[in-house]
Image (tube, rainbow, N blue to C red):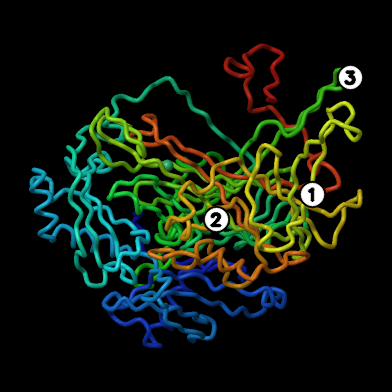
Amino acid sequence: MSHLQPVSIDRIATPHPLDPLTGEEIAAARAVLVTAGLLGDSVRVPMLLPDEPTTQELAAWSPGAAIDRRVDATLLDVTTGVATEVVVSITRGEVLRSARVPNDAPPYGQPQYLFEEYERAEAIVKASPEWQAAMRRRGLEDHMALAFCGPLAPGYTGRADEVGRRVIRSLTFLKYDEHDSPWAHPVEGLVVHIDLTANSVIRIDDDGDVPVPEGHGNYYPETQGAPRTTLRPIEITQPEGPSFAVTGSLVEWEKWAMRVSFNAREGLVLHDVSFDGRSVLSRASVPEMVVPYGDTAPGRFWISYFDAGEYLLGKNANHLELGCDCLGVIRYLDGYVADDHGHPVRIPNVICMHEEDYGILWKHTDLAGRSDVRRSRRFVISYFSTIGNYDYGFYWHFYLDGSIEVVAKATGIVFAGAGEPGVRQPHATELAPGVFAPVHQHLFCARLDVAIDGADNRLVEIDAQRIPMGPDNPFGNAFTWSETPLVSEGAAQRDADSSVARVWEVQSASRTNHVGRPTAYHLIPEPTALLMADPASSVAARAAFATHHLWATRNEPGQLWPAGRYPNAHQGGSGLPEYTADDRSLDGEDIVLWHTFGLTHFPRPEDWPIMPVDYAGFWFKPYGFLDQNPAMDIPESSQAHSAAGSGCCGGGDACTCAH
Ligand code: CO
């Protein structure tokens, strides 16, 4: 888990209702909770988020006007397990709503884990006589002090001794010295099930043990031998500074403008994204992801991490260091989250913004031999979060031609168990001798509150369509396309199909372009696998969002979470299945798209000891939103800083380095 720094508070100079929470505001919200008697000694704050202004409040607001700033928090009494949801007006200094969370009754669902619970879980395991006995039986008594007891969300198994309780599971990993990576030394078959409210062990599984793999999984340079000396520096210079401007939460780059925000759960959130003064998205984020494991072993069959809903992507976000994560002229924004006690914590440099050269934007050599070329550039907003062994980057790319690309990056340490070296397993691959990584998926869900030229939009599925040879296709070469309106939330639960180049078109219901068609954007999915678990499985109910590439809902306040507000130990059915239960009309409405994309991993030796970044994402591209290529006025780029030397275009005098 990341270690958050103490508070230091900045005030945003130009307040806007969509600004992220400041440290001062989190402190003020906490004071209201204390005064109201809601934050006694045994009460913690698993989640604290901005309660965002409604569409009506935003419409009524003008610069300089008062803003009712609110916080939406979940409180947990750690001695009783009682959880409460509270909405606080910071502006008015009062509690607006307070309600008990029914976490002890079906469909259950526990508040997010506290950082202190990870430490508490390890202490409970190490004090447990059963765990100590299991370690001794395996001859590991000398490793107990240094052992790492990884705290893991339990999934939902329906066991009577678990349902409705605040459970965490612990898997044991050895460390052979203080700096040794524990992930390389799993103690197979040893699972400790813990009740965090009772501070006790519910039970221990202790069988199926095999020898602990002893090969190290360390990646620090001092463990890898001398670094290579063949790479020469690449310097990115922007002598006149970057082309973007930041004013409070407002970011402007070329024809793009947007409000940048950050919260403890979703991390980066973009509001009011517009191109050339016309609205494209009113809110965009990646609010959930699930990492389901495909192994039947007692220590793994229940694993299906919801990194946002169970662990909080934003609270675990990284402090980004200049030069490490991005190159060029970088502007960072700090983020503020609440710690376990509700105190504000500043995460310095949590959001990174910069520009990148992106090769050719457009090019043509005409019949007379004249060549015109313009370089592409993209504006990048990103953050990274570390949840246990894995690290996730979330990148939003904005291009000069009006396109948006969203990329999730997965890296870090692959999670593994132990097995007999050289013996093939059906659900895990051998990464290093005796180190077996279960097959698994990383399925992300992007939430796009689309607003193509305003809130009134329509959704259409477009497929390439074959035509049988016959009177309509006499030569057999012809093909066309089909347009299927997705008019309701039920009809809009759709899967990608790369065999027909399927895209989903979001149209304005009121504006047309200069050829008379509705202005529109296309959501272009990658052809990736959906949830591989059986439809009857627990995880299929809990991660229903991951059973379709596309869902669409009518925008409604509070409907922000693909797997519900509390996916932890939840039996399923929350989030998108609930939101779409009424099958509301989407025709001309304020539509929200929910897009599942991701990775299916059969881990490989090359992913060890640390995994090269793997990528997944999608595009959101204008399709008749604009009347022509919006980048015709990009000037030719100067090559003053490029050298036509070796390694550039293969060298030679004629090289212009415009590739
Ligand atoms: Co993976």
Q: Earlier in the sequence, mark 1 or mark 3?
A: 3
Please tell me in which quarter of the rendered image ligand 1 is found: top left
For residue 542, side relative to residue 395 (left or right): left
Q: Nearer the viewer, mark 1 or mark 2?
A: 1
Q: Position of residue 370 (x, y in %)?
A: 85, 21
- The residue under label 2 is 286
Distance between the alpha carbons at the discs numbered 3 and 2: 47 Å
> Left of 119 or right of it: where is 448?
right
Three-letter residue code for mark 2: Val
What residue sits 43% from the left and 60% below the top?
312
Q: Which residue, as the protein is rendered here, is positioned at the far front?
A: 470
- In the drawing, what numbered circle is on residue 483? 1
Looking at the picture, which amino acid does disc 1 mark?
Glu
Q: Residues within 10 Å of mark 2 (few under 14, many from 20)?
A: many
Residue located 41% across and 61% down the image: 310
Callout 1 environment at 10 Å: few (<14), some (14 to 19), or many (20+)?
A: some
Quadrant of the drawing holding the N terminus: bottom left
Provide the residue designation for mark 3.
367
Residue 137, image x, y percentages? 8, 47
Residue 493 relative to residue 363: left or right: left
Mark 3 or 2, closer to the camera: 2
